[in-house]
């Protein structure tokens, strides 16, 4: 049973526009969330995180929003650049489980020049 | 700084063969993890080691064993490979806090 879901397998955006990647989760015990970026033939790399005590975290062009009541988080990339083309995974961990993370299935972002 | 190094990068096994996937990190991280990535399934945790000398099962441990050889190394063993174990395997380590995992580049395993 998939506890973290990314319902959009792919997304295409024009360079300079906003990319919005969405993630839903079912476990109300999740209290820490991360986004990873993955290029082909490489391992995922950490992008940005958010704790459940916050509803927003920003790092340069990347902003993550958390809506706990809806069990939904999103990653905004503004402005999108061709180098952002990659697969993005969201991941969540539950309080008391250390750093065990549950991953979504990923969204493949293509930024069109 | 190499980060997390996995070997081999590619492997083809016959059903029933055994093999060990190697992982080493040079960041002095306490915790290490093995994940597998399958199409449509995301990354799923196989085993993890919160510290040297400890290992615990993750979400999908059946068919695998692990060894935390020392603080740097965490190996994953398939005793009798099955086609269902065809996957991309990622090793990761972390220092806790807000930085997330550091992943290796993966091992693409095919069992025929």
Image: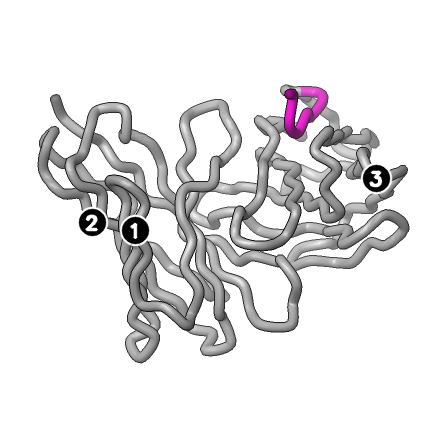
Q: Is residue B47 visible?
A: yes
Q: Is residue A104 visible?
A: no
Q: Which quadrant does the C terminus of chain A fall into? A: top left
Task: Tell me which colouring the rendered structure shows.
Answer: one colour
Judged left or right of residue A5, residue B43 is: right
Q: Which residue is drawn at the image coordinates 48% and 70% (left, top)?
A: A31
Q: Which residue is mark 2?
A: A20
- How many residues crowd around disc 1 within 10 Å: few (fewer than 14), some, or many (20 or more)? some
Q: Which residue is mark 1?
A: A58
Name the chain letter of the residue that bears numbered label 1.
A
Q: Which residue is drawn at the image coordinates 42% and 25% (left, top)?
A: A40
Name the chain letter of the residue that bears numbered label 2.
A
Evaluate whether label 1 is on the same chain as label 3. Answer: no
Gap in angstroms between the C-alphas marked 2 and 3: 39 Å
Residue B75 placement: quadrant: top right
Residues B15 and A6: in front is A6
Judged left or right of residue A86, residue B53 is: right
Q: In the image, which disc is placed on residue B71?
A: 3
Q: Which residues are magenta?
A: B1-8
Q: In the image, which disc is placed on residue A29?
A: none
Evaluate whether label 2 is on the same chain as label 3. Answer: no
Residues B87 and B101: in front is B101
């Amino acid at each position: 049973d998939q506890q973290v879901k990314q319902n959009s397998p792919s997304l295409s955006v024009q360079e300079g526009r906003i990319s919005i990647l969405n993630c839903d989760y079912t476990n109300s015990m999740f209290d820490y969330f991360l986004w990873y970026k993955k290029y082909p033939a490489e391992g995922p790399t950490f992008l940005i995180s958010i704790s459940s005590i916050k509803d927003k975290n920003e790092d340069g062009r990347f902003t993550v929003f958390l809506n706990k009541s809806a069990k939904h988080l999103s990653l905004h990339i503004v402005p999108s650049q061709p180098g952002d083309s990659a697969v993005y995974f969201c991941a969540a961990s539950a309080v008391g489980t250390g750093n065990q993370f549950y991953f979504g299935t990923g969204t493949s972002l293509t930024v069109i020049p | 700084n190499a980060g997390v190094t996995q070997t081999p990068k590619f492997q083809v096994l016959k059903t029933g063969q055994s093999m060990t996937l190697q992982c080493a990190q040079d960041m002095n991280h306490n915790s290490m993890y093995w994940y597998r990535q399958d199409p449509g399934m995301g990354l799923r945790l196989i085993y993890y080691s919160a510290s040297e000398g400890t290992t615990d099962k993750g979400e999908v441990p059946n068919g695998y064993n692990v060894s935390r050889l020392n603080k740097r190394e965490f190996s994953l063993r398939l005793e009798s490979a099955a086609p269902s174990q065809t996957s991309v395997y990622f090793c990761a380590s972390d220092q806790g806090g807000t930085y997330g995992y550091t992943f290796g580049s993966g091992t693409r395993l095919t069992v025929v």
